[in-house]
Amino acid sequence: MTNYIKWTDDLSVGVEALDDDHKTLISILNSYIEAVEDDEGVLVYDSIFTSFMDVAKAHFQREEELMEASGFEDYELHKEGHVSLATQLQEMRSKLMTSTEDSMQEDVRDFLVNWLEIHIMVKDQAYRETVTAYLDSK
Ligand SMILES: [Fe+2]
């Protein structure tokens, strides 16, 4: 039994639109966890996974615009992390669709949970101060 991810206020990055994206990603990921628990099958996993990718893509764009506009010093590095994740997601999606191993959907789940926790709890907290100061000054 895998734990679902819960949103709590200490996960906030101080920007409502970005918090909303993170909440949506958490919610999609929880749907994926539930689908795996219920052994729904690859077509369901793929449909949820595709929504996750779409929301993540739009979210990264929003983050990148704000990081760049605010002059966040690690903008390039953070952006590279987004590109590399997008590539990993593409690879995972093909594995998910073609793998004959039963554990594949669980590997994908564990990867996404781990990634999302680090993304929200660590990586995105780094731009919080710069981006919120920028938005407050507008
Ligand atoms: Fe984020």
Image (cartoon, rainbow, N blue to C red):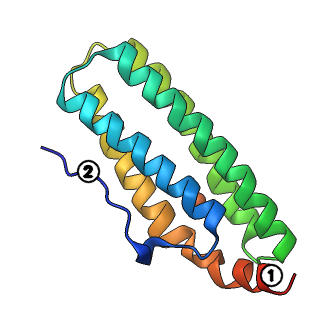
Q: Position of residue 32 (x, y in %)?
A: 34, 34
Asked whether, in this view, residue 127 is left or right of residue 108, the answer is right
- Quarter occupied by residue 90: top right
Look at the numbered disc 2 and say if its residue's Cβ is closer than 8 Å to ligand 1. Answer: no
Total label count? 2
* Residue sitting at x 29%, y 27%: 104
Asked whether, in this view, residue 136 is left or right of residue 96, the answer is right
Say which residue label 1 marks: 134
**Quadrant where the C terminus lies?**
bottom right
- Quarter occupied by residue 18: bottom right
Asked whether, in this view, residue 133 is left or right of residue 33, the answer is right
Disc 2 + disc 1, Cβ < 8 Å: no
Could you tell me the amino acid type at mark 2? Tyr
In the rendered image, the vertical position of residue 58 relative to residue 17, given as above or below: above
Residue closest to the far left:
1
In the rendered image, the vertical position of residue 133 relative to residue 131, given as above or below: below
Q: Position of residue 73 (x, y in %)?
A: 77, 78
Q: Position of residue 100 (x, y in %)?
A: 28, 12
Mark 2 and mark 1: Cα distance apart in space: 34 Å
Callout 2: SS: loop
Asked whether, in this view, residue 30 is left or right of residue 126, the answer is left
Q: Nearer the viewer, residue 125 or 7?
A: 7
Ligand 1 image-quadrant field: bottom right
Could you tell me the amino acid type at mark 1? Tyr
* Residue sitting at x 59%, y 44%: 56
Sequence order check, earlier mark of 2 and 1: 2
Say which residue label 2 marks: 4
Q: Residues within 10 Å of mark 1 (few under 14, many from 20)?
A: some
**Quadrant where the N terminus lies?**
top left
Numbered circle sitting on residue 3: none
Callout 1: SS: helix
